[in-house]
Amino acid sequence: MPGPAEPRTADPPREPAPFLKWAGGKRQLLPEILRRVPALIAGTYFEPFLGGGAVFFALVAQGRLHHAVLCDVNADLIGTYQAVRDQVDEVIEALRDHQNEAAYFYRIRSTPPESLSLAERGARLIYLNRCGYNGLYRVNASGKFNVPFGRNPNATICDQKGLRAASDALQVAELRIEDFATALGEARQGDFVYCDPPYVPLSATSSFTSYTRGGFTLEDQKRLRNLALELKRGRVPVLLSNSSAPCVVDLYSTGFRRTEVDVRRSVNCQPGGRGTVSELLIE
C-alpha cells in the first residue's frame, strides 16, 4: 500500500519589492545603498522622493526599520501606495477586471482619477504602469498621464502575492503628499534620511522629470543640498543619489563624501537612451 501522503507545505512568504516600474528606480544600486544604511534604524526612516520604493522595501525585508515616513509630491503615486497599504483586497479585485488591450488601455487612461474610489485609482495607476510603454510614468502640461499603450502581451497586470507583501511592508509607513523640505524638517538624531531626487540630466536631451508638473529645478537641487547640510550638522545621517553631472559634483564638493558608481538604465522614452551611466552616492 502506498505510504501516507507528504504534508503540503505553504509557500514561503514573499519578500516585499516594488510593484511599480519607475524611472530612476534603485534596484541595481541597492547593494551599494544598503551598505551605507545602519544595520538597524533606531528612529524613523525618511524617504521624501519615494518613486518605486526599492530601498524602503529592501530595508523592511531585512528587518532594519520599524517606522518610516514616505513622501512624494506626486499625488497619484502616494494615493496608490495608500490604496495598497489600506485596501489591498479591493485593489487586487479591481486589477482582475483590467485588460491588456489597446482600446481598453486608452479608455482607462482617459478616465479622470478623481471619479474613482481610492482602490480603483490605485489599480488604475498600477495597470497603466504595467501595460504602458516601457513602464513609464509621465504627465503632460495639464497633469494628465500620456504614456502610450506598451503592446506587451506578457504584461502581468495583477501580481497578487507581490501586492500583499507590499501591503504588509507599508503598515509601518506614514504616506504623505509633501515637499521634501517639509518632511525632512521633522528628522532628528537616531533617524536616517535617504533622498533620491529627480536627477540633474547629463545632457540636454536626457532629462526625464515629468512625474509632476513643473519638474525639479536646479534651485530645488540647491535647496536639497542646503537641507542635507543642515541635517548633517544636526547629526542626522543623510544619503543622497544623483547623476554625475558637473553641477552636482560642484554642489556637493564641500561637506560631503561622493562615490561614483556605474548602473544600467532601462526606463527611457527612446531605446537608444538606455545603457550604462555613472551616478553618485553622496554622504
Image: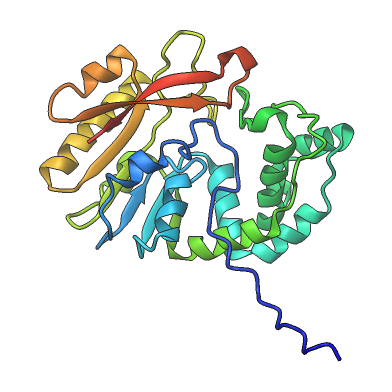
Q: Residue visible at 65% across and 62% down? A: 88
Q: How is the image coloured?
A: rainbow
Q: Position of residue 212 (x, y in %)?
A: 53, 31
> Percent x, y for residue 43?
26, 61
The front one of 225 and 269 is 269
Q: Is residue 74 left or right of residue 32?
A: right
> In terms of image quadrants, where is residue 179?
top left
Q: Is residue 91 above or below residue 131?
A: below
Residue 98 position in % (x across, y down): 82, 48
On the question of residue 270 being in view, the answer is: no
* Residue at x 46% of width, y 36% of height: 28
Write the residue at 39% across / 55% down.
Answer: 59
- Is 249 above or below relative to 223? above
Which picture quadrant has residue 274? top right
Give me the residue at 42% from left, 16% from top.
201
Q: Is residue 265 visible?
A: yes
